[in-house]
Image (cartoon, coloured by chain):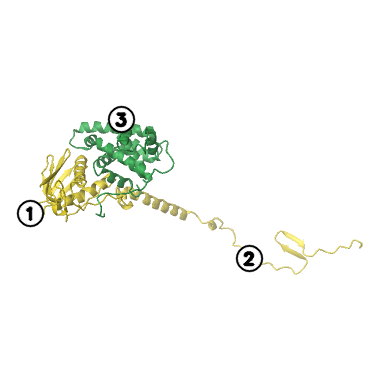
Amino acid sequence: MPHDSPTLEISLRLPRRGIERLDLLLLSVEALDLNGGEAMVWMSEQMGFTDRFPNRVELWKSRCHNPLRRTTRRGELAAADGDALIRILCALADRLYPVLRGLLSQAEAPEVLVQRWALFQSRLSELVKERMNPRRGGVQKYLNPETCVAECRQLVQSLALASGAGGFERLKASLLDAGS
Amino acid sequence: MKQTLRYDQLSCRLLVEGLPDVSAGQPDDAVGIITSWTLDWAGRPQLEGRKEHLVALMQVVMPYARHRISGVARRFGDATQPVDIGPAEAGEGHLLMLRSSQSDTPPLQIGLDDAELSDLVRVLDLLRMDPRLQLPLAIPVSRPLKLREVLERTPLPQRLAAPLGGALVLAMATAFALMLPSPSALRPNNPPSPPHQPSPRPQGGRFQGPGLDVPRALPKLNPWQR
C-alpha cells in the first residue's frame, strides 16, 4: 500500500455488492435503534444533505437501489449520493458506538450478551423479511438461524470499525472492494 | 512548550507528548516532534515507547482494521517487526504481539476482543486526524481490496468446492459417455456395404437415374402412320 496520503479521495460509484452491503448496514442501524429511520433523516439534515435528500422519501429511494429489496429501483446510485449515505451511516454508527461496543465486548456477562444478540438478530430478521426479497441467496443467509449469527456479527463489527474519525474512508474502501 | 495529546476510549487511553517544531513555524499548541507516548489498557500492562514504535503500531493496526471491516482476517507484521497483529488462533478475538528492541526481553502478547480492537482503532484514528499533530506519519491509505484478497475470507474448502464439483461431474459424464456402445456395434449382422461405384452411364435409350426411368430421347410419333 502506498504511504502518500493519509486520506482516501475516491469518487467512484459503488458496485452492486457495495450497495447491498451499505443498505444492510443501514438496516442494522434500524435494528439497533428503534427510531433508526427517524435518526437517519435527522442526521441527514444535521450533516447538510437536505439538497440531496430533501425528505425521507428521497432517502428511501436512494436506498432502493439495493437489488436485494422487494421494490428495487433501476439505474445506478450517484457517487455523491453513495458518499452521503456512507457519511450518514458512519455518523449513526458513532452515535450508537456504546451499543455496538456492548455487543462486541467479551467483558459483559454471557447471559446478557446472549439476550442482546438474540434481540438484535430478531429485529434484523424482521426488517429483512419485511423489506428484502426472500428468494435471493443474499437475503436467505440473514433469515437462516445458522448463518445469521456470523453475518450479524460481521455487520456489527463493520459498524464499530466504521465509527469514529477514520471510519468513512475505511468503510468506503471496503464497499468498493473488487468482487464484493 | 511541551504538549500532551490525550485520547480516551472505554478500554484504553493514548497519551502523546511532544513539542512544536519551531523551526518549521508551527504554533505553540502543535506537536511536530513526538518525545514519548503511552497506551494504558484497562487491566493490562501499559505500553510506552518512542515515535518509531507508535508508527509501527499504527502501520499494522490500521490495515488490519481495514481488512476486518471487509471480513478478511489475516496477519499484519512478522517476527522481524516490532509489532504484529492477527486473528487469535483459538476462538474469537485478536492477538497483538509487541517485541522489544532489547534481546533479553520476551515479546509481549495482548489478546483483544472486538470491542477493544475498535477502541484501539478509534484512538489511533483520533491521533492521526488530529490537526494539532503536524507530523507526517507513514500510515497505509485505506484502499479497496483486490479480488485475490477478498477471496481469502472464504474458507479454502468452500472456494474449491465449485471447481472440484465441476471437474467431478465432467469426469463422470465422460466415463458414462465412454461406456455407451458405439452406433456401429448396434448392427453387427449387416454386411458391409460394397464401396460405391458409379454405374456406367448408358450411351443411348434411357437415362437411369435414381427414381427416374425416362427415355433420354422421346420416339418420334407419326400420326399418319398406321
Label whose residue precedes the other's in the sequence (2 or 1): 1
- Residue nearest the viewer, comparing A86 with A71: A86
Cα separation between marks 2 and 1:
96 Å
Tell me where residue B196 appears, x and y as whole percent.
63, 65
Q: Nearer the viewer, mark 3 or mark 1?
A: 3
Q: Residue A59 location, x and y as percent?
A: 37, 36
Total labels: the figure holds 3
Depth check: give the residue in front, A40 or A118.
Answer: A40
Mark 1, residues whose alpha carbon is within 10 Å: few (<14), some, or many (≥20)?
A: few
Chain letter matching colour yellow: B
Pinpoint the chain carrying mark 1.
Answer: B
Question: Helix, strand or loop at disc 1?
Answer: loop
Colour-to-chain, green: A
- Give me the chain letter of mark 2: B
Query: Residue drawn at (32%, 45%), measured in percent from left and top?
Result: A175
Chain letter for the residue marked with disc 3 in the picture:
A
Q: What kind of residue is marked 1?
A: Asp
Taking B164 as reference, is B225 left or right?
Answer: right
Question: Residue B196 got which mark?
Answer: 2
Name the residue located 24 percent from the left edge and 31 percent from the top edge: A115
Disc 2, SS? loop
Residue neighbourhood size for the residue with mark 2, other residues' Cα within 10 Å, grouped as few (<14), some (14–19), many (≥20): few
Tell me where residue B122 sits by quadrant.
top left
Do marks 3 and 1 share a subunit? Answer: no
In front: label 2 or label 3: 3
Badge 3 crowding class, 10 Å Cα cut-off, few under 14, some 14 to 19, many 20 or more, is few
Q: Are marks 3 and 1 in contact (CB under 8 Å)?
A: no
* Residue located beneath label 3 in the image: A35
Residue with the most extreme left position: B104
The residue indicated by pointer 1 is B104
